Amino acid sequence: MPATREKALTEHEFELLLEGANRICHTERRLEARATILLGGRLGLRPGEVTHLSNSWIDWDREMIHIPEHHICQKGQNGGLCGYCRQAVEQRLRHGADESFEELADRYWLPKTPAAVRSVPFHFSSRVRVTLELLSNTHDGWPYSFSTLQRRVETALEAAPRLPTDATSPHGLRATAASYHAGRGLDLTALRAMFGWEDLKTARQYLNVDGAMTRRALSAIH
């Protein structure tokens, strides 16, 4: 599924959502909500990527997050698969996979597609780096399952001033990031590589969201 464009936030809305996260009283939940918003809304990580984020993925010197080909999921009950991975395995079984549940489970977590194995820079944002450092020091990566990720976004939306509670979602944050970078001139090939899309069609739909490219071009000549 491509990022959900209709759930993409404008820059102003994104700042309001971050303000909602900042209003969460519980210190760790506030950090987790900010991390969810920034990793999705500025780096464009998929919810499954955020959920399985580990310190081992982060290259602090080069300021890159490396999405691996495989990561063992132990975020479910008793160290088993989380609900996100379990759902993915069950979906593959419904679509006629030849392997058993146990055989498929051994291979999760997996990126969505081969193109999703990629490196995502974060050097352009000091607040992303600071949030990553705090998350890393506190939890060694993202500590919980996908359901907690969703709850943190929902809590931030509830606390955000002047934003409807259905303004975005974990998937919508990825669309927010795509719109943000495309609007600043990230070209088609780089956008595709950063977001791990298999073809250029998905990237192309973000190139003139809200007239950002037109505005930038006009500013360059006037």
Image (cartoon, rainbow, N blue to C red):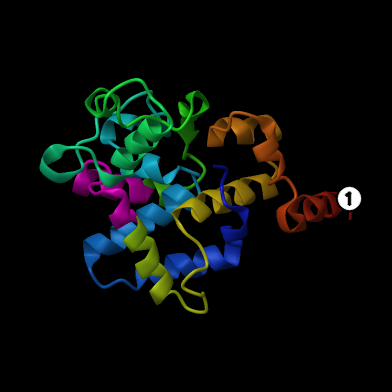
For the N terminus, the image quarter is top right
Nearest to the observer: residue 23 or residue 89 = 89
Q: Residue at x 74, y 54 (%)?
A: 212
Q: Is residue 165 above or below residue 103?
A: below
Magenta region, residue range: 130-149
43 is within the stretch colored magenta: no
Asked if residue 100 lies left or right of residue 36, the reply is left
Q: How many marks?
A: 1
Q: Which residue is farthest right? A: 222
| Residue 213 appears in the picture as rendered | yes
**Does residue 84 sit above or below 17 in this rendering?**
above
70 with respect to 38 (left or right): left
Task: Provide residue 166's location: percent of width, then percent of height.
Answer: 49, 69
Rendering coords of residue 73 (x, y %): 24, 34
Q: Quadrant of the C terminus?
A: bottom right
| Residue drawn at x 43%, y 31% as measured from the top left | 95
The residue that appears at 33% across and 42% down in the rendered structure is: 87
Rendered image quadrant of residue 6? bottom right
Asked whether residue 132 is drawn in magenta, I would say: yes
Q: Of helix, strand and loop, which one carries label 1?
A: helix
Name of the residue lying farthest toward the bottom = 162
Residue matched to label 1: 221
Q: Position of residue 42 (x, y in %)?
A: 50, 49
Kindly identify the amino acid type of the residue bearing the numbered disc 1. Answer: Ile
Q: From where the camera sits, is residue 21 visible?
A: no
What is the crowding at mark 1: few (fewer than 14 residues within 10 Å), some, or many (at least 20)?
few
Q: Main secondary structure of the magenta part?
A: helix
